């Protein structure tokens, strides 16, 4: 208290300085925040996570393991192997190979960089528009020379590195034009591109169709069972974390298809398409939602306070907290990511809370502190003194509980969630600091506003309060039965809860990415992949017939899974080789009979015959094998089920090998597992923090428990909502429960403190607490609920789910506070009230005519 | 760098240009003969040739009528030795044609595998014949000659790198004299003339460094179909054997995959007595 008094004296003397200081800090943070960079990786798990490392391992040992953009072509003609379609496919392949993601500004910048070199070092470094993929070598040379001369700063180095990706985004195009085919030509083994040139006549096209359709290796991967469709795999050199480049690639591919005026229908899919579109949608939405949430919160505040000042000040505080937080992110070396783009939305919704308390209390204090004998400034100072005396500690406590809720998200390997939790917590702390510094200063500085009319509560509000009081105090048994029924419903809902994720399912069924994905499911094995790397104890292991036969068994088991559309693995190569070695007899499409060294010699023949694609599925020492599973869905549970079913089969068939699940599917599975871990740890931590704070506040185990019980109900309700609605507990919705605890406990603190300080019986205390707390808690719920509901306007289902769930959970939190919390109080013996002096001066909100006296 | 030229730079080739010869293995036993009428007499004459003539001179360099050697191929993945191959090599020129036989003795799982390469300078390289004998099958399969992108016994050398030099496949532009490891060489830029060359080799462009004294290509940069630098071949050791400058050590680095192959040639003999019957598809698999 002495501290607050001292602060008040300082405030009275130096309020302008304080305002200036806050604004100066804000300017500083704003300047720093302007340099905020974006880490647009679509992966929630850090590169150090085992699943990501497995992916890196895969990429470093196998060809064809870059991110693959898929382009499905479907013709309306009877067969895709017609002259027009083949001509178009040929044209598209060549165009994709020459595609760059550059523009004229890149050329200018390159030319400027060349000018930094001494004249004699500029040889061979001519850049003109349009840039060509082959100029990647020139860019590398330029980078080397700039480094040698010592004129390359970090920004340019980063840009040149990025340019190497953009100038050469395509590693390899696997289309009819480029993909290798293994056939017999008389006695000759012929490994050749399936269609190096477009066949000139019908006979050539028929031969091509027959050759393609007979290729068991490519069936359902590139060659559809329908003669009307083929697939093209565009392996990208773009690092998987570089979502902006993926987006540019997706857009450039779509534009290229348009520009080339291709005659058939083209669909774009695969993980890069989904990641590119997810990242684009979330970024666009979060940018759009920022002004929208400002507007919504302003409207709600306007309805509550009916005063422009009381609208703009809380919004201003929240806005400054956003700037401070973003500036801090830069100072601490963090980048904005796919989750933290939602940070401003959260901070605006939550950050107004303290100032709403402050303004409500200040407005209420106006009548009781007016003293005709004092000048206006002194009156304002006295009113502020009372508000600060009585609000500082409760605001601190409620801020701490909110901070605790968000900080509990830090104990997760999903680093984006951890960062999000940490920075929202920091933002809440900033909002608290700004509320305590800027607000009193502004109130001292600004001319006194005309005292807002103390509105009478509306009839509806009075009726609601009355009903709640009656329900709690007179129909306790019925309410208890109702609560038990709700809890049973919650329990049943929780049983239906699915921890899952389906990236394509987050898009509207009308979106291009969703519809394109359906085509891959219909015509091919699917656009999602799950991969297994099998590490054998010694080199040459996968040249041995029994081990290839083991792989074949695994492959067959995989194909029996209802969600598996195709499998691409070593046995298919061996079978195709065997067929070619027997004059392309379709009956010979099976593994050759086991004999000493036969498989090794087949493979030797393959390598010497211009075979390269086999290194997509084995490493060059034949110690590692890779099984690529094309899955009809990217639903994590389906991926996990495949892993679960196939692991014992691999162990049985190839007991010596180590299984390393990898690729897109494994990252999805690992993310799901981490969500479970995150949910458990963050919930435990949230409850621990909240319980500790309640214990510190009330110094009563019973009251602490009473405070926590409704929160348990809220969390159960949150999970039940997910269960009953069929929504998944995923990366987005997993953050709701701990947040609900952090925010929901604020209601409990206000309510329980009122009960505890009430001199009457439990029943009287509860009735009075409802009378006093109903409106402020409801209004707080409205601010948060309406604020987060903005997210439901997103075009991305993950954000819609998040918005809907947070809003519902806020409402649930209010309901549990009004209905369950009073029951808990009523069922217990009221403990002796602590000395008022011992308790922090927690006061309720007073808005629109629900006053309780501020202690003088 | 491991370049060590054992022979004296002042040394002049004593072998005159014979009627035949060339490179089956460009950098392997690089020696050939030049048509006498076209043969430049010395280094300065070589240097003054047009790029096409220079390549012809390299192709027709003198190397006797037959040659035999043991080859070791080391396959490296970055800094790690992944595998080793042992090959016995025998080659004979007959008129305008050349037959090459290779017998693989290591690794064990492909031991006994043999390769027969038949080429005719007057015919298109598409008409070359390549047979691969597989002991497990006990038969020889023919490999398609129009596409020579296959990896020569799993190395970074492809068949197109090792075929008899085909200067007519590329158009050349001289970049002038440059120094290469303290030796004057001529830099040539070669661009594929036709799609069929791309299909056969996978190379859209090459940059070659020709040593006029050795009449050897001492280094080559290979560019892929998209024009990106793909591989680099560098000669590491040249020795004079039976008065013929012979590359005994070279490497091929795949700059895109990080894999490389080092080739060591030992026990080299020129103008050896050869049994013609060996160069027959039916005889493949028999060790000589």
Image (cartoon, coloured by chain):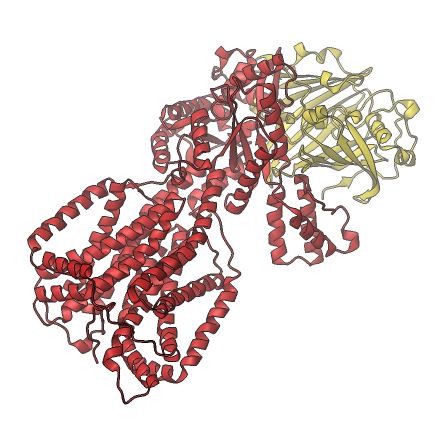
x 17%, y 58%: residue: A464
Colour assignment, chain A: red
Task: Residue at 38%, 57% (x, y): give it.
Answer: A293
Which shade of the palette goes to chain B?
A: yellow
Residue A509, visible in the rendered structure: yes
Q: Position of residue A317 (x, y in %)?
A: 39, 67
Q: Nearer the viewer, residue A806 or A571?
A: A806
Q: Is residue A273 left or right of residue B148?
A: left
**Which residue occupies the foreground of this view, A262 or A530?**
A262
Viewer-side residue, A848 vs A231: A848
Residue A658: quadrant of the picture:
top left
User: Would residue A242 be seen by someone viewing this image from the given angle?
Assistant: no
Image coordinates for residue A372, horizontal then vertical, percent: 27, 87
**A775 lies left or right of B236:** left
Q: Quadrant where the C terminus of chain A lies?
A: bottom left
Residue A87 picture location, percent across and down: 62, 24
- Look at 77% across and 26% down and name the residue there: B169
Q: Choose between A616 and A852: the one closer to the eye.
A: A852
Image quadrant assignment for residue A298: bottom left
Which quarter shows the N terminus of chain A?
Answer: bottom left
Name the residue located 25 percent from the left edge and 57 percent from the top edge.
A687
């Amino acid at each position: 208290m002495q501290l607050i008094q001292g602060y008040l004296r300082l405030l009275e003397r130096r309020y302008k300085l304080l305002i200036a200081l806050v604004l100066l800090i804000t300017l500083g943070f704003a300047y720093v925040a302007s340099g905020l960079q974006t880490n647009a990786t679509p992966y929630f798990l850090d590169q150090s996570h085992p699943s990501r490392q497995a992916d890196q391992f895969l990429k470093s040992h196998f060809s064809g393991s870059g991110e693959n953009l898929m382009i499905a072509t479907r013709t309306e003609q009877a067969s895709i192997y017609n002259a027009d379609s083949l001509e178009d496919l040929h044209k598209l392949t060549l165009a994709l190979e020459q595609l760059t993601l550059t523009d004229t500004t890149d050329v200018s910048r390159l030319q400027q960089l060349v000018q930094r070199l001494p004249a004699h070092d500029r040889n061979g470094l001519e850049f003109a528009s349009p840039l060509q993929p082959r100029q990647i070598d020139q860019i590398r040379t330029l980078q080397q020379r700039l480094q040698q001369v010592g004129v390359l700063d970090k920004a340019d180095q980063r840009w040149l590195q990025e340019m190497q990706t953009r100038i050469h985004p395509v590693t390899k195009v696997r289309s009819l034009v480029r993909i290798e085919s293994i056939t017999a030509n008389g006695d000759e083994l012929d490994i050749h591109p399936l269609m190096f040139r477009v066949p000139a006549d019908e006979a050539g096209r028929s031969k091509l169709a027959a050759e393609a359709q007979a290729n068991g290796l490519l069936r359902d991967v590139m060659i559809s069972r329908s003669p009307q469709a083929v697939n093209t795999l565009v392996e990208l050199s773009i690092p998987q974390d570089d979502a902006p480049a993926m987006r540019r690639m997706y857009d450039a591919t779509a534009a290229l298809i348009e520009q080339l005026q291709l005659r058939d229908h083209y669909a774009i899919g695969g993980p890069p398409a989904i990641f590119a579109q997810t990242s684009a949608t979330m970024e666009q939405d979060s940018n759009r939602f920022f002004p929208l949430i400002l507007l919504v919160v302003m409207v709600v505040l306007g309805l509550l306070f009916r005063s422009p000042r009381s609208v703009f000040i809380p919004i201003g505080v929240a806005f400054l907290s956003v700037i401070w937080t973003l500036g801090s992110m830069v100072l601490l070396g963090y980048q904005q990511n796919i989750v933290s783009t939602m940070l401003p939305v959260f901070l605006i919704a939550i950050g107004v809370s303290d100032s709403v308390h402050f303004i409500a209390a200040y407005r209420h204090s106006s009548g009781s502190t007016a003293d005709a004998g004092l000048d206006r400034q002194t009156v304002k100072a006295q009113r502020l003194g009372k508000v600060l005396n009585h609000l500082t500690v409760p605001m601190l406590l409620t801020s701490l509980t909110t901070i605790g809720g968000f900080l509990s998200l830090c104990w997760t390997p999903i680093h984006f969630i951890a960062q999000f939790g940490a920075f929202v917590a920091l933002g809440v702390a900033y909002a608290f600091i700004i509320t305590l510094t800027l607000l009193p200063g502004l109130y001292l500085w600004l001319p006194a506003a005309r005292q807002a009319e103390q509105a009478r509560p509306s009839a509806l509000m009075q009726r609601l309060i009355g009903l709640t009081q009656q329900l709690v105090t007179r129909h306790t048994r019925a309410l208890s039965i109702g609560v038990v029924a709700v809890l049973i419903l919650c329990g049943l809902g929780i049983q239906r809860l699915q921890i899952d994720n389906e990236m394509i399912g987050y898009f509207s069924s009308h979106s291009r990415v969703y519809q394109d994905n359906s085509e891959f499911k219909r015509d091919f094995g699917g656009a999602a992949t799950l991969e297994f790397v099998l590490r054998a104890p010694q080199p040459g292991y996968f040249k041995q017939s029994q081990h290839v036969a083991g792989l074949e068994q695994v492959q067959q088991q995989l194909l029996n899974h209802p969600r598996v559309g195709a499998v691409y693995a070593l046995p298919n190569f061996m079978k195709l080789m065997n067929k070619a070695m027997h004059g392309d007899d379709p009956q010979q499409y099976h593994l050759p009979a086991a004999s000493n060294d036969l498989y090794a010699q087949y493979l030797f023949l393959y390598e010497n015959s211009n075979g390269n694609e086999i290194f997509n599925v084995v490493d060059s020492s034949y110690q590692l094998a890779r099984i690529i599973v094309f899955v009809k869905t990217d639903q994590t549970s389906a991926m996990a089920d495949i892993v679960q079913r196939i692991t014992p089969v691999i162990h049985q068939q190839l007991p010596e090998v180590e299984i390393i699940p990898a690729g897109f599917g494994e990252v999805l599975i690992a993310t799901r597992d981490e969500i479970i871990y995150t949910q458990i740890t963050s919930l435990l931590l949230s409850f621990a923090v909240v319980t500790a704070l309640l214990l510190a506040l009330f110094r009563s185990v019973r009251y602490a428990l009473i405070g926590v019980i409704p929160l348990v109900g809220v969390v159960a309700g949150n999970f039940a909502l997910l269960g009953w609605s069929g929504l998944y507990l995923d990366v987005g919705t997993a953050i709701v429960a701990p947040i609900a605890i952090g925010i929901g406990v604020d209601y409990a603190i206000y309510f329980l403190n009122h009960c505890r300080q009430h001199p009457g019986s439990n029943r009287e205390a509860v009735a009075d607490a409802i009378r006093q707390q109903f409106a402020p808690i409801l209004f707080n719920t409205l601010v948060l609920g309406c604020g987060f509901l903005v997210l439901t306007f997103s075009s991305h289902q993950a954000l819609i789910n998040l918005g809907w769930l947070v809003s519902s959970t806020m409402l649930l939190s209010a309901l549990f506070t009004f209905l369950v919390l009073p029951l808990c109080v009523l069922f217990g013996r009221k403990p002796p009230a602590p000395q008022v002096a011992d308790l922090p001066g927690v006061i309720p909100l007073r808005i629109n005519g629900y006053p309780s006296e501020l202690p003088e | 760098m491991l370049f060590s030229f054992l022979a004296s730079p002042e040394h002049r080739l004593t072998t005159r240009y014979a009627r035949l010869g060339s490179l089956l293995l460009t950098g392997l036993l690089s020696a050939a003969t030049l048509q006498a009428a076209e043969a430049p007499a010395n280094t300065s004459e070589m240097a003054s040739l047009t790029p096409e003539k220079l390549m012809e001179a390299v192709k027709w360099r003198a190397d006797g009528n037959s040659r035999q050697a043991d080859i070791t191929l080391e396959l490296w993945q970055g800094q790690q030795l992944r595998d080793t191959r042992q090959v016995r090599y025998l080659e004979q020129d007959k008129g305008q044609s050349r037959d090459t036989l290779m017998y693989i003795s290591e690794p064990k799982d492909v031991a006994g595998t043999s390769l027969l390469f038949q080429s005719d300078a007057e015919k298109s390289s598409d008409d070359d014949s390549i047979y691969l004998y597989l002991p497990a099958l006990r038969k020889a399969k023919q490999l398609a000659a129009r596409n020579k992108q296959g990896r020569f016994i799993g190395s970074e050398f492809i068949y197109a790198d090792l075929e008899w030099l085909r200067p007519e496949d590329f158009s050349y532009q001289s970049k002038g004299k440059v120094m290469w490891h303290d030796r004057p060489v001529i830099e040539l830029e070669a661009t594929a003339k036709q799609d069929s060359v791309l299909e056969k080799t996978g190379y859209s462009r090459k940059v070659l460094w020709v040593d006029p004294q050795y009449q050897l290509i001492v280094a080559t940069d290979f560019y892929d179909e998209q024009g990106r630098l793909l591989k680099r071949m560098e000669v590491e050791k040249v020795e004079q054997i039976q008065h013929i400058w012979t590359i005994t050590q070279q490497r091929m680095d795949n700059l895109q995959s990080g894999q490389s192959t080092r080739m060591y040639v030992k026990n080299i003999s020129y103008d050896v007595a050869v049994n013609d019957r060996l160069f027959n598809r039916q005889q493949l698999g028999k060790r000589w």
